[in-house]
Image: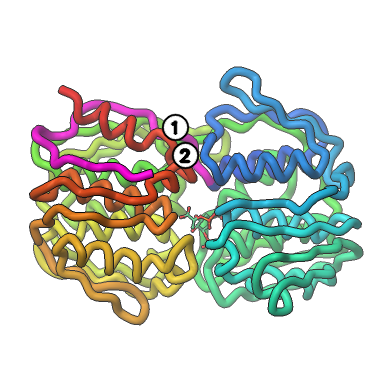
Amino acid sequence: MEQKIQPLKNGLRGMVTIPGDKSISHRAVMFGSIAKGTTEITGFLKGEDCLSTVRCMKQLGVSIVEDGDKIIIESSGLKGLKEPDAVLDVGNSGTTIRLLAGILATSPFSSILVGDDSIAKRPMGRVTGPLKMLNATVDGREHGQYTPLFIRGGDLRGVHYVSPIASAQVKSSILLAGLGARGTTTVTEPYRSRDHTERMLQSFGVEVNVDDRSVSIEGGQTLTGTMVKVPGDISSAAFLLVAGAITEDSEVVLKDVGINPTRTGILDVLKEMGGDLTISDETLFGEEPVATLHIKTSKLVGTTIGGELIPRLIDEIPAIAILATQAHGTTIIKDAEELKVKETNRIDTMVSQLKELGANIEATPDGMRIIGPTPLHGGTVDSFGDHRIGMSMALCGLISADSITVKNTDAIAVSYPNFFEHLNLLSEK
Ligand SMILES: O=C(O)C1=C[C@@H](OP(=O)(O)O)[C@@H](O)[C@H](O)C1
Ligand SMILES: C=C(OP(=O)(O)O)C(=O)O
C-alpha cells in the first residue's frame, strides 16, 4: 500500500488517546502466559508485532481470548507450556523473538523460531550467546547468529552476564531464562535500558533486585496472574509530538502516555530543542507512570544527542531527525550504532529518504548530522517495510511544498495501526 500525504492547510488541533505501549503489551502477554492463573490486560496494543506474540503463545498451548476491550489469559504457568507442533513465526518483531527465546530456553522441549525478511537480517547472537552460557541448547543459522533459531530448553544455571550493549531485549531474555535457572542470574548493562520487565515481573509477584546498571533474579520463582493496564506508547506519541511542533498553528493533546523515565529521552530532547511541551495529569497505571502531553507549534534549535540518552529514545530517532530538519542549527546524533540493526538500517534509510526530499542530512559512523531549517519538497519515498520510517516520512508530507507519496505504509500497523486516522482527526477543522 502507498499513501499520498498533502501539505497541511491549517494546523493540527485536538486530543487523541495514543494506542497501547508495544513493549508493555508484549510483556503482558508473555508474562501472563507463564503465570499461574488468570491475567487480564486492558489497553493492549493490537499492532501486528503484539499479535505475533499472541499467536506464538497460543501455539505453546496458552489460552488467550479477547473479551470486549480486554485480553484474558489462562495458564497453568511456565511448566504448562507445550511443545509447538509447527514453527513459531514472530513476523517483524525483534522483541517477540528475543524475549521468547529466553522463555523457551527454560522449557524442556524443542522449538524453532522464524520471522520475516527483516528479522532474518537482525542479530540473534546477542541472546543466543548468553542463553548458551546458562546451559540452554540453542542453535541457528551461522551457529545461532541468525534465524531460524532452534531451542531445546533444559537444566539451566544462573550466570552474571555483562552485556556489551544497553538492550532491554537482551536483558529481558536472560532474566526470563534466569527464572527457570538454578541460583541467581544477573545482567549488567553499559547504560540502563527500558525497565518494563523489571517493573512488570514484580506485579506478577516476582522479586527482582535492581542495583544501578545491574538487575538480578533468583531462579525458581513463580509468576501469579494479575491485571495489567497498558499505558499509551510514548514511541507512537513521539510522531504526533513532532508533528505538533513542526507544523504552524498547532496544538495537540495526547492522553494517557507512558512516561517511564527509561523511555522519556524524547521529552528531554524536545524541551532541549525549544519544544513548547507541557506535561500534566501524572498518575500510575500499575507500576508504570503516565501523563497527558501537550505540544504546540515550536521554534526549534539544533542539539547533540548521545551516550546514556540513546537507549532512552532509540526508537524515536527517526522522528527526531524530522524535528531536526526544521530546527535552527546543527543536530548531531551519536553513539547510535544500534539503529543499524533495527527493522531497517535506520541511519541509511532516514538519510537516503530525507535527502530525497531536500533535507541537509549526512550519515556518520554512529548516527547522523542534520542542518536546519530546510524546506522539504514533494516526492516519493519508501518505508522499506519499517513502521517508524513510514510514519517519519508521513510527517514530512505535512510540511513539504508539494504532496509526498510514501510507499509500503502497511508496515505502520506493526506499532500504530490507527496512525493515519489520528492524523486526519487532528487535521479536521
Ligand atoms: O524491549 C523492548 O521492548 C524493546 C527494546 C528496544 O530494543 P533493544 O533491546 O534491541 O535495544 C527497542 O528498540 C524495541 O523497539 C523494543
Ligand atoms: C525496533 C523495534 O521493535 P522490535 O525490535 O521489537 O522489532 C521498534 O519498534 O522500533
Residue 214 appears left or right of 424:
right
Q: Which residues are magenta?
A: 1-22
Q: Which residue is nearer to you in this view: 102 or 195? A: 102
Name the N-terminal-most of marks 2 and 1.
1
What is the crowding at mark 2: few (fewer than 14 residues within 10 Å), some, or many (at least 20)?
A: some
Tell me whether the residue at label 2 lies in contact with that at label 1, contact meaning CB atoms closer than 8 angstroms: yes
Label 1 amino acid?
Thr
Numbered circles on residues, count: 2
Measure the alpha-carbon separation of dots 2 and 1: 6 Å
Vertical placement of residue 289 versus 382, above or below: above
Residue 33 visible to an observer of this rendering: yes
Q: Is residue 238 magenta?
A: no
- Residue 292 placement, left or right of 356: right
Could you tell me residue 181's position as x and y percent?
84, 61
Q: Quadrant of the N terminus?
A: top left
Residue 163 percent location from the top left of the image? 61, 74
Q: Secondary structure at mark 1?
A: strand
- Counting from the top left corner in percent of width and height, residue 357 is at 17, 60
Which image quarter holds the C terminus?
top left
Left or right of 218 on screen, residue 289: left
> Circle 1 is placed at which residue position?
283
Label 1 CB sits under 8 Å from any ligand 1 atom: no
Would you place residue 408 above or below residue 330 in this image? above
Membership of 13 in magenta stretch:
yes
Task: Identify the image quadrant of residue 420.
Answer: top left
The residue under label 2 is 289
Image position of 151 with respect to 332: above or below:
above
Seen at 58% across and 40% down, the residue is 25
